[in-house]
Amino acid sequence: MKLAAVALVFCLLSLPILSLGLTIQVEPKTSECFYQKITASSKVAFEYRVTRGGLLDINIKVTAPSGRVLHQELHFFRGDDEGVTKFDAEEDGVYSFCFDNEMSRWTAKVVDFDVISSDKTAEDILSGGKK
């Protein structure tokens, strides 16, 4: 039985999954974007949630390296609601994951998010940038 448990743990650790969860504060009248290099044919899940600020709303935008918008919406969070966007990367390159709080006059938003990719490139961890 112990051998099976060890084998299961080894298999799970060997999966080429890259995940990094972050919490950020998006100030009013600003946008915050994060970037990740992703290889074509990787499976990607972008999970996000506003945990504090105003009506718990935020504009979300996911863009491919070519500039094509993969997902865009104004999301309102209620209770334990979590936003999830899943896609298969169709091209190699740097994808952007943006939170836009331009519509807020005074209220900052606190956002928890995670980009999970089956990409094998562990050195390409999220890096932040401001608009």
Image: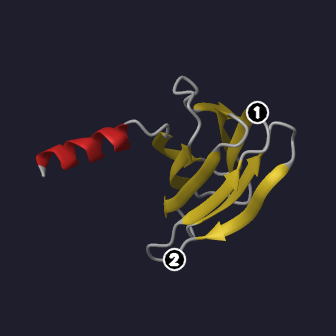
Secondary structure at badge 1 equals loop
Estimate how packed mark 2 is, as few (under 14), some (14 to 19) or many (20 or more) residues with alpha carbons within 10 Å: few
| The C terminus: image quadrant | top right
Estimate how packed mark 1 is, as few (under 14), some (14 to 19) or many (20 or more) residues with alpha carbons within 10 Å: some
Q: Which residue is mark 1?
A: 92
Expressed as whole percent of the image width and height from the top left, the position of residue 18 reads 50, 38
Q: Residue furthest bottom?
A: 78
Residue 130's quadrant in the figure? top right
Nearer to the camera, 7 or 46:
7
Q: Is residue 101 visible?
A: no
Expressed as whole percent of the image width and height from the top left, the position of residue 107 reads 58, 58
Up-down relation of residue 55 to residue 88 (above or below): below
Expressed as whole percent of the image width and height from the top left, the position of residue 67 reads 87, 41
Q: Amino acid at mark 2?
A: Arg
Q: Is residue 70 visible?
A: yes
Left or right placement of residue 52 versus residue 108 in this view:
left
Secondary structure at badge 2 equals loop
Nearer to the camera, 95 or 53:
95
Q: Residue at x 50, y 72 (%)?
A: 81
Expressed as whole percent of the image width and height from the top left, the position of residue 27 reads 60, 47
Q: Amino acid at mark 1?
A: Asp
Q: Residue at x 44, y 73 (%)?
A: 80
Q: Which residue is mark 2?
A: 78
Up-down relation of residue 87 to residue 18 (above or below): below
The tag earlier along the polypeptide, 1 or 2, is 2
